Amino acid sequence: MNKTNWAGNVSFTPAATETIESEKQVEAVIHRAVREKLPLRVIGSGHSFYPLVATPGISMSLSGLQGVVAIDPGRLEGWVWGGTPIRALGTQLHDLGYAMENLGDIDVQSIAGAVSTGTHGTGIDLGSLSTQVVGMELWNGLGQKVEIHEKKNADLLDAARVSLGALGVITKIQLKLKPKYILEMRQTKESLGSLMSNFRRELQDERNFEFFWFPHTETALVKRSHISQESPLSPSLGQKFNDIVLENMALGALSGICRWIPPITPKVSQFCAAAAGESHRRDWSHRVFATERWVKFLEMEYAVPIESFPEVVQEIQTEIKKSHHRVHFPIECRFVKRDSIWLSPAYGRDSALIAVHMYQGMPHRAYFDAMEKIFRKYEGRPHWGKLHSLGAGELRSIYPKWEEFQRLRKEMDPHSVFLTPDLRQIFGENQETMLSTRSA
């Protein structure tokens, strides 16, 4: 059966599909993959734009392993199954009195997939989702369970927290938690120039700070959030309808016009900037973080050193003006605290993460190539779940722990069972070590 990701840009037909409902099944499927020389990848919600899970071999779903396993109230930690969607996890933790420290604005991914790709929210004093992981259980390429936490194999944690699924199948994750809390978020419309001159102060003053700049304009939509002691403020049905239905439907209709008549794209971006509204939400954190996305697009995102952020934004502005890129989707700017995770885009440095988007079906290559050139000029590192063009040579030069990860990967997966052609491009695996990629 053919499988396609959310955006529709990745399509593949695996030789076999397995839905896992027990850890013994995981062990058996790995042994089968080694025995039959079939590359094995775990598929989650299919929200990655990069073909990380595309395989001609075995496609494994952990959808049968969902939910909270156990909570340690004293340590504020909890074990959860790796196949749990973030949206369901937020609800289950809330019902038990807990929440995650920070989340991104998409909540459909599985927690294992989000962690493995370095998925993040925003807040310069807050790390990515991966930094909230304090332990995990994974099954390596020999079909052996490996337990990783501070009391056992703690030295592997910084390698395994962002691993692209190349070290093994993550069945359980141990998370740092917080008592459930209420976030108050205000969305305002401001000038890009004002934001750029004050962004350092914004990062210091706000728990969560991000903005969306509309290309071909000087307008940005800004989101600021902080923890509130007040009660949740329930949105009216009209506000919900406006935020979810009208905004998505209007964006979808305008995007369709841009695809049909590309020259009007800058005018559409200007219209969207003028029409964008301000809003106020106060609710439980997992509800405030999430945003409904109905309109499909392609995305590239890079992490650049926070010190380089103003120069990068200036170069993006200049490039869009000079080359007249036909893009109307806003450019999203978020911020993440440095960490010690080997393959994290924020490894060793506070980072600004800049995401560019293109509506599904519109030409994106020239725009993305131009943006990637700017990102790379400033030592940018790609978000693993988003589009990028880098191979092993370029990646080795921007990740200080690259060789250490490679050695560990080969130790954990000596038969390269978790490598597909796309993963081999990332890790530079020689063709001689390739597993058979027989089709069904």
Image (cartoon, helix red, strand yellow):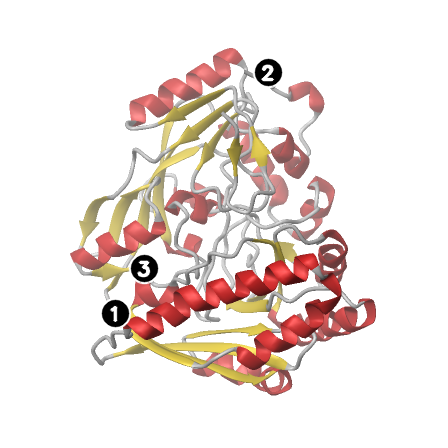
Q: Is residue 287 above or below residue 438?
A: below
Residue that extends furthest to the top in the rendered view of this protein: 35
Quadrant in the picture for residue 143: top left
Q: Are marks 1 and 2 in contact (CB under 8 Å)?
A: no
Sequence-wise first label, 2 or 3: 3
Sequence-wise first label, 3 or 1: 3
What residue is pinned by disc 3? 100
- What residue lies at 38% left-to-right and 47% top-to-bottom? 111
- What residue lies at 26% left-to-right and 45% top-to-bottom? 79
What residue is pinned by disc 1? 181
Q: Amino acid at mark 2?
A: Arg
What residue is pinned by disc 2? 438
Sequence-wise first label, 1 or 2: 1
Q: Amino acid at mark 3?
A: Met
State left or right for residue 242 relative to residue 151.
right
Residue 351, percent from left and from top: 57, 66
Say which of 56 and 378 sits in front.
56
Q: The C terminus lies in which quarter of the figure? A: top right
Quadrant in the picture for residue 193: bottom right
Q: Is residue 44 above or below residue 114?
A: above
- What residue lies at 29% left-to-right and 35% top-to-bottom? 65
Q: Amino acid at mark 1?
A: Tyr
Label 2 Cα neighbours within 10 Å, binned few <14 / some 14-19 / many ≥20: few
Residue 117, percent from left and from top: 50, 47
Residue 25, percent from left and from top: 33, 22
Residue 344 in view (yes/no): yes
Residue 337 in view (yes/no): no
